[in-house]
C-alpha cells in the first residue's frame, strides 16, 4: 500500500465520521425542538361556539321601581304613534342566589370541572379561558369553589385561584371584546 492510498483512506474515514456526527446532531436537534413545543390548547364542548357574539348584559339598577314602564297618555290624534315600552335584557337576567357572585376563568388553558373539591375526584366537564361562570360556594378549606356555567348546563368544583371575581362594569366591557 502506498502513501497516497493511506492518505485517501484517512481522509475518507474523517469525512465519514464527520457526516455521521453531523447527522446525529441534526437528528437530536430535530427531536429536541419537537419535544419542547407546547401542546395545543384543548377545546371544550362549551367552547365550540365561543366566537359567536353574546348579547351585552346591562347592569341591574339597585332600585326596582326604575324598571317599571311609565304610562303614556293616549292621544285622540291617530296620526301620531304612541310609544310602547321595549323589553330589555335586564328582565331576562336572573338574580343570583345569596352569597353567589360572577367570576371569570383566568387559567390560560381552561379548567377541568370536578364532581368533588379534590384533585383526585372525577372530571365531569370543563370551562374555557375567559369564560364567565357563577360561583356558588366555597369548600371548607377555602381552596375550591363550586361553579355553574352561565347557561346552567355545567356545575362542579374548580380551584379558587383560577377564578377572578367580576364586577358589574367589567362584565359589559368583557362582552364587548
Image: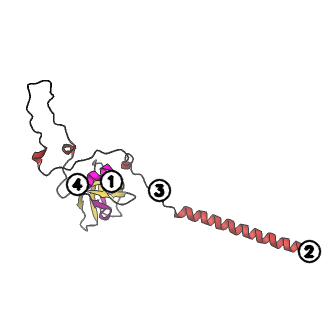
Find out whether residue 169 is within the magenta segment. Answer: yes
Q: Which mark is residue 12?
A: none
Residue occupied by mark 2: 2
> Of 90 and 9, which appears nearest the observer?
90
Q: Secondary structure at mark 1?
A: loop
Seen as rendered, the residue at the extreme right is: 2
Q: Residues within 10 Å of mark 4 (few under 14, many from 20)?
A: few
In primary-sequence order, the first of circles 4 and 1 is 1
In primary-sequence order, the first of circles 3 and 2 is 2
Q: Residue at horizontal 68%, vertical 67%?
A: 22
CA–CA distance between discs 1 and 2? 79 Å
> Of 109 and 143, which appears nearest the observer?
109
> Of 159 and 87, which appears nearest the observer?
87
In primary-sequence order, the first of circles 3 and 1 is 3
Find out whether the residues at labels 4 and 1 contact each other: C-beta distance under 8 Å.
no
CA–CA distance between discs 4 and 3? 33 Å
Q: Secondary structure at mark 4?
A: helix
Residues drawn in magenta: 157-177
Q: Is residue 52 left or right of residue 140?
A: right
Residue occupied by mark 4: 168
Q: Is residue 151 left or right of residue 29?
A: left
Q: Is residue 71 left or right of residue 122?
A: left
Q: Secondary structure at mark 3?
A: loop
Residue occupied by mark 1: 131
Q: Residues within 10 Å of mark 2 (few under 14, many from 20)?
A: few
In primary-sequence order, the first of circles 4 and 3 is 3
Q: Which mark is residue 40?
A: 3
- Splitting the image into 4 quarters, where does residue 53 fall? top left
Q: Is residue 149 above or below residue 77?
A: below
Amino acid at each position: 500500500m502506498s502513501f497516497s492510498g493511506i492518505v485517501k483512506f484517512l481522509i475518507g474515514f474523517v469525512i465519514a465520521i464527520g457526516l455521521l456526527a453531523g447527522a446525529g446532531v441534526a437528528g437530536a436537534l430535530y427531536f429536541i425542538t419537537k419535544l419542547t413545543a407546547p401542546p395545543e390548547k384543548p377545546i371544550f364542548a362549551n367552547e365550540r361556539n365561543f366566537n359567536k357574539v353574546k348579547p351585552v348584559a346591562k347592569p341591574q339598577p339597585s332600585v326596582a321601581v326604575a324598571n317599571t314602564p311609565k304610562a303614556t297618555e293616549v292621544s285622540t290624534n291617530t296620526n301620531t304613534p304612541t310609544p310602547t315600552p321595549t323589553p330589555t335584557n335586564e328582565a331576562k337576567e336572573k338574580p343570583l342566589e345569596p352569597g353567589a357572585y360572577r367570576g371569570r376563568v383566568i387559567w390560560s388553558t381552561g379548567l377541568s370541572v370536578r364532581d368533588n373539591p379534590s384533585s383526585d375526584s372525577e372530571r365531569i366537564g370543563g370551562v374555557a379561558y375567559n369564560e364567565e361562570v357563577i360561583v356558588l360556594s366555597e369548600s371548607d378549606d377555602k381552596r375550591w369553589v363550586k361553579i355553574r356555567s352561565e347557561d346552567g348546563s355545567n356545575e362542579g368544583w374548580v380551584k379558587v385561584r383560577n377564578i377572578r371575581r367580576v364586577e358589574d362594569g367589567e362584565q359589559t366591557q368583557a362582552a364587548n371584546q
